[in-house]
Amino acid sequence: MWKTVIRRLLILIPQLVVLSLFIFFIAQYMPGDALTGKSVDPNADPQRLEELRQQWGFYDPWYVKYVRWVGNIFKGDLGRSYTHQVPVTQVISDRAGNTFWLGLMTVFFQYLISIPLGILSGRYHDKIPDRAITLYSYVALAMPTVVACLLSIFTFSFGLKWFPFGGTISIEAYAAGGIQAFLSRIHHMILPALTVALISTTSITQFLRSEIVDYEQSDFVTTARSKGVPKRVIYSRHIFRNSMIPVSSFMGYSIVGVLTGAIFTESVFGYPGMGKLFIDSVFSRDYTVVNALIIFFAILTVLGTLLSDVIMSLVDPRLKVK
C-alpha cells in the first residue's frame, strides 16, 4: 500500500505541472488586472497605475511570469496578493481554518443523516419509508446548492432567527473569548454545514440502500435465514456490516467535495473561508491568489482519491491497493 501512496504522489507532480500551465495561461489572458478591479480607487492617477504595472511585471511575457512564479513556489513563496497587500500564504492560511472546520462539520452531518436514511430505505424497500426517502433524495438531487442556501437563510436566519447570517463569530463572543467564542463559532457553522449536508446525502443514501437490497438476496443471508438466525442478527452482523464497506470509501470524495464546493456555500452565507476568498479574488482579478487556490484544490482532489482507496483497503482486508 505504501508503494501505491508514493507512486500516486509522484504522479501528482506532472499533473500539477500541466494544471499550473493551463490555469496560468488562462489567467493571463483574462480581461483586466489587479489594478482595474473594484479595489482600486477610481480617482487614482493613471500614470501611477502604469508605473505599478511596470513595477509588478504585468507586461512581461506569460512564460517569463510563469517561470518566475514557479521559481518562487519552490522557495515557498506563492507571491503577494495585490488586493490584500500581504503574502498569498498568509491570506490563504487565515481562511483555511474556517473552511476546514466547516467542511469537517458538513461531512459529519452528511454521514449522520445519510447512513440512517440508507439503512431505513434498504430495510423497508418498496414500502412507505423507502418511498418517502427516495422522494427526499430526488428533491435533494435536483436542488441547486445556491437555492438551498438562500432558502435556509430566509427561513432560519431572517424568519425564525435561529442562526446568524454571515461571519464566523459574534462580536460579543469574540470579546469574551473562551467557551463562549467556541460555541459562537459552532453556532455560525451549523446552518451552512447542515444545509449542504442535507442536499449532498443522495449518493451515500442510495448507494447504501442498493447494497442492503442486494445483500438481502445473497447466498450467505439465505443460509443464515435457513438456520433460524434472528432477523435482527442477520441485518446487524451480515447485511449492514458488509454494506458499510463500500460506503466508507466515499469519505475521501466527500471531504474533497465539501472543501471544493465551499465556493458557493461560503459566498452565499458570507462565511470567510477559502471558497469566498476564491470568488472575491476572481472579481478583484487577484490572480496570484486564484492560481494558488486552484493548485490547492487540485492537490486536495488527488489526495481525496488516494484517501478513499486507502480507507477501502483498511476496512476490507480482502482488498489490497495494488
Image (spheres, rainbow, N blue to C red):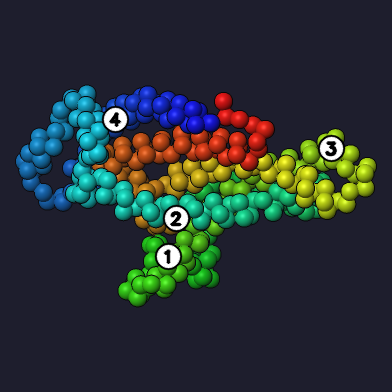
Tell which tag, 4 or 1, sits nearer the viewer: 1
Gap between marks 2 and 3 measured at Cα: 42 Å
**Is 12 placed left or right of 308 in the picture?**
left
Q: Are marks 2 and 4 in contact (CB under 8 Å)?
A: no
Q: Quadrant of residue 53?
A: top left
Q: Is residue 12 visible?
A: yes
Of labels 1 and 2, earlier in sequence is 2
Residue 26, numbered label: none
Hey, what amino acid is under mark 2?
Trp
Of labels 4 and 1, earlier in sequence is 4
Hey, what amino acid is under mark 4?
Phe
How many residues crowd around disc 3 within 10 Å: few (fewer than 14), some, or many (20 or more)? Answer: some
**Residue 120 screen position, x and y as percent:** 75, 52
Gap between marks 4 and 3 measured at Cα: 55 Å
- The vertical placement of 26 against 248, above or below, is above
Element on which disc 4 rests: helix
Element on which disc 1 rests: helix
**Residue 82 screen position, x and y as percent:** 20, 45
Residue plotted at (50% across, 28% down): 4
The residue that mark 4 highlights is: 24
**Residue 108 screen position, x and y as percent:** 56, 54
Q: Are marks 3 and 1 in contact (CB under 8 Å)?
A: no
Of labels 3 and 1, earlier in sequence is 1
The residue that mark 2 highlights is: 101
Q: Is residue 69 visible?
A: no
Q: Are marks 1 and 2 in contact (CB under 8 Å)?
A: yes
**Is 184 placed left or right of 320 in the picture?**
left
Tell which tag, 3 or 1, sits nearer the viewer: 3
Element on which disc 2 rests: helix
The residue that mark 1 highlights is: 185
Of labels 2 and 4, earlier in sequence is 4
